[in-house]
Amino acid sequence: MAQGLAAVDFNVTEGTAAAIAGFYQNVLAAPAKIESDSGHAVAHVDIGRNQSLRFRESKEPIAPYDGHHIAIYVANFSRAYNFLKSRQLISEEVRNHQFRFKSIIEPDSGRIVFLLEHEVRSLHHPMFHRPFVNRDPAQSQRNYRRGRDALIPFGRD
């Protein structure tokens, strides 16, 4: 990976790692597994090439959710949308090939196990495969045009 985050770690309540891994596997079709690290269960979710989310169980109190979010791309957009919509978990309806939700639930019971807002994008989203190198920070999703966001053109010193 030339640039980007290899992993994002979250502390979660004890006994929730398996439910979180199950959510990502069943709802978002993301590869997930449970690992053990220093005696703590960790849900390891692959979300891209060489990128993952890690949810580490902790005995310490978990900080309240502060409203941050992640953006992810899914191949089966309608599957995730229909599952979450049927459980009234969509917080922002489909707009420009994306929707949002924040409750990670145990798929069978519906029990909320963690809060993290997800901006779920389809592979038809205009910013899919946007390069990380030389991006213009002023470029927004609204005015994004593929191939026109280079801050510093390649090959120029």
Image (cartoon, helix red, strand yellow):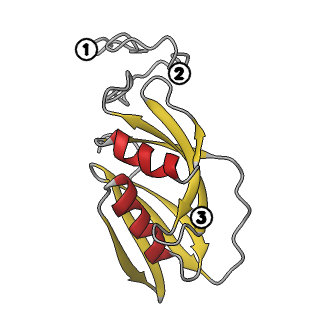
- Give the residue at x 25% y 14%: 155
**Looking at the picture, how far across and down is residue 46, in whole percent?**
33, 58
- Label drawn at residue 137: 2
Inspect the image, locate mark 3, and give the three-letter code of the amino acid beneath it: Phe
* Cα–Cα span, label 2 and label 3: 31 Å
* Cα–Cα span, label 2 and label 1: 20 Å
**Looking at the picture, how far across and down is residue 132, in whole percent?**
38, 31
Q: Residues within 10 Å of mark 1 (few under 14, many from 20)?
A: few
- Give the residue at x 39% y 11%: 145
**Looking at the picture, how far across and down is residue 95, in whole percent?**
50, 25
Inspect the image, locate mark 1, and give the three-letter code of the amino acid beneath it: Gly
Give the foreground label among 2 and 3: 3
Task: Say if 20 sits above or below 48 in the image.
Answer: below
Q: Residues within 10 Å of mark 2 (few under 14, many from 20)?
A: few
- Give the residue at x 29% y 53%: 50
Q: Is residue 25 left or right of residue 65?
A: left
Task: Say if 7 sits above or below 38 in the image.
Answer: above
Residue extending farthest to the front is 86
- Label drawn at residue 125: none
**Looking at the picture, how far across and down is residue 103, in whole percent?**
59, 56
Give the mark nearer the N terminus: 3 vs 1: 3
Q: Secondary structure at mark 2?
A: loop
* Residue picked out by circle 3: 114
* Cα–Cα span, label 3 and label 1: 45 Å
